[in-house]
Amino acid sequence: MSLTSLNEGILEQLEYEGIQCHRAPLSEMMLFLWKEASGNGKAAELLKSWEKQLSLVHNRLGSRSSFSADFAALQKCADQYLADYSGANGRYRYAKAMEMGEKHSGILMMAPRYENTAMVLNMRGLHDHCQAPVYDLSLDGDFDEAGWEKLKSFLYYCEV
């Protein structure tokens, strides 16, 4: 799962090699963030209509969809595991990894090395609660051959 385009071409290379990658949709992440900040009123109505549009996109994409089939379930999961956290979209990232872990054989969590939220997600038990194995990639422009070997080993054992 990558919320950044600063992934050093890793996902593109994996796809080139025939490994199917599903990315967390930026539009869904933004909707999650806006819904949490909006409260009630006119904004909530507008966001509900956007949620319906994302649901339509999910249905059209079928098995290739990375969108959540049940957006409310994402929010419920975030409330269950990270009710008191608000940094760097951590609630969405945790809930999305949990959801994707139910459907996929492995989860790649990609984050810049300087970011603390990835560490918080791990401390809150993401690896323990997710149904699929989770591999953390801390990126800082130095992903080398050793990094590729570790990643390929993870993917091999996930039977991707």
Image (cartoon, helix red, strand yellow):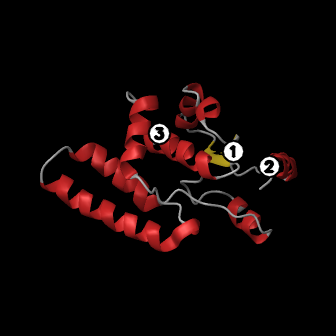
x 77%, y 56%: residue: 160
Query: Which quadrant of the structure image shows residue 132?
Result: top right
Task: Please say if the residues under marks 2 and 1 sit with CB atoms less than 8 Å apart.
Answer: yes
Q: Amino acid at mark 1?
A: Leu
Q: Residues within 10 Å of mark 2 (few under 14, many from 20)?
A: some
Instruction: State the CA–CA distance, disc 3 to disc 1.
Output: 16 Å
Task: Please say if the residues under marks 3 and 1 sit with CB atoms less than 8 Å apart.
Answer: no
Vertical side of 10 occupied by 88: above or below: above
Chain-order first, disc 2 or disc 1? 1
Residue at numbered disc 3: 90
Q: Secondary structure at mark 3?
A: helix
Chain-order first, disc 2 or disc 3? 3
Is 74 left, or right, of 139 in this rendering?
left
Q: Which mark is residue 137?
A: 1
Q: Residues within 10 Å of mark 1 (few under 14, many from 20)?
A: some
Q: Residues within 10 Å of mark 3 (few under 14, many from 20)?
A: some
Looking at the picture, how far across and down is residue 71, in whole percent?
Answer: 39, 52
Chain-order first, disc 3 or disc 1? 3
Q: Amino acid at mark 3?
A: Gly
Can the viewer see residue 88? Answer: no
Looking at the picture, how far across and down is residue 155, in whole percent?
Answer: 79, 51
Residue at numbered disc 2: 151
